[in-house]
C-alpha cells in the first residue's frame, strides 16, 4: 500500500492534492470495485467452509462461464487451446464431484502381529 501511495503522489500528486484521491471514479469504476470486493469475500467464505481444491474448481468454472458470456456479448472467439482447457476443466469438475467408490479393505502383504513367542505371524523371527 505504501508503494502504491508513493507512486500516486509521484505521478499525480498535484491533482490528488487539489481534487482528492477519488477523482475520476465513475459509477462504472465503483461497480468494478464492489464486484471485486464481493468476489474476495466470496472466496474467503468458500475457503473457510470448503477446501482449496473446490475454490480452484470454482475459479476455473467462472473462467469458462465468463468465456461463454463473452462469446455472446463481445464476439469473443476462443482458440483450440482454450477449448481443450475448457474440456479438461469440466472433466475435472465432474471427476471431483463423483462419489467415492467403496473400497475393500485389503490384508497387509507382510505380517504385522507378533505371536506369544515373539515371532511375526508368518513364522519370521527377529
Image (tube, rainbow, N blue to C red):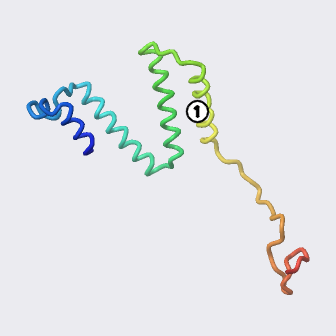
Residue 1: which quarter of the image? top left
Asked if residue 4 lies left or right of residue 13, the reply is right
- Whole-percent x, y for residue 104 in the image: 77, 56
The residue singled out by tag 1 in the image is 89
- Whole-percent x, y for residue 84 in the image: 61, 25
- Residue 19 vs 49, above or below: the answer is above
Front-lying residue, 70 or 98: 70
Name of the residue lying farthest toward the right: 123
- Whole-percent x, y for residue 22 in the image: 17, 32
- Whole-percent x, y for residue 106 in the image: 79, 60
Residue 25: which quarter of the image? top left
Residue 5: which quarter of the image? top left
Name of the residue lying farthest toward the front: 10
Local SS, label 1: helix
Asked if residue 48 lies left or right of residue 57, the reply is left
Residue found 18% across the figure and 26% down from its top: 24
- Residue 46 vs 10, above or below: the answer is below
Q: Quadrant of the C terminus?
A: bottom right
Name of the residue lying farthest toward the top: 75
Name of the residue lying farthest toward the left: 18
Asked if residue 92 lies left or right of residue 38, the reply is right
Residue found 64% across the figure and 45% down from its top: 99
Amino acid at each position: 500500500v505504501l508503494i502504491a501511495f508513493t507512486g500516486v503522489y509521484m505521478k499525480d500528486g498535484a491533482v490528488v492534492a487539489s481534487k482528492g484521491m477519488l477523482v475520476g471514479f465513475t459509477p462504472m469504476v465503483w461497480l468494478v470495485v464492489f464486484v471485486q470486493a464481493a468476489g474476495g469475500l466470496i472466496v474467503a467464505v468458500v475457503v473457510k467452509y470448503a477446501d482449496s481444491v473446490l475454490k480452484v474448481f470454482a475459479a476455473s468454472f467462472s473462467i469458462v462461464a465468463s468465456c461463454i458470456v463473452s462469446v455472446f456479448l463481445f464476439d469473443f472467439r476462443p482458440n483450440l487451446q482454450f477449448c481443450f482447457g475448457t474440456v479438461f476443466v469440466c472433466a475435472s469438475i465432474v471427476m471431483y464431484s463423483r462419489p467415492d467408490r467403496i473400497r475393500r479393505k485389503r490384508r497387509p502383504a507382510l505380517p504385522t502381529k507378533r505371536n506369544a513367542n515373539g515371532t511375526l505371524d508368518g513364522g519370521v523371527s527377529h
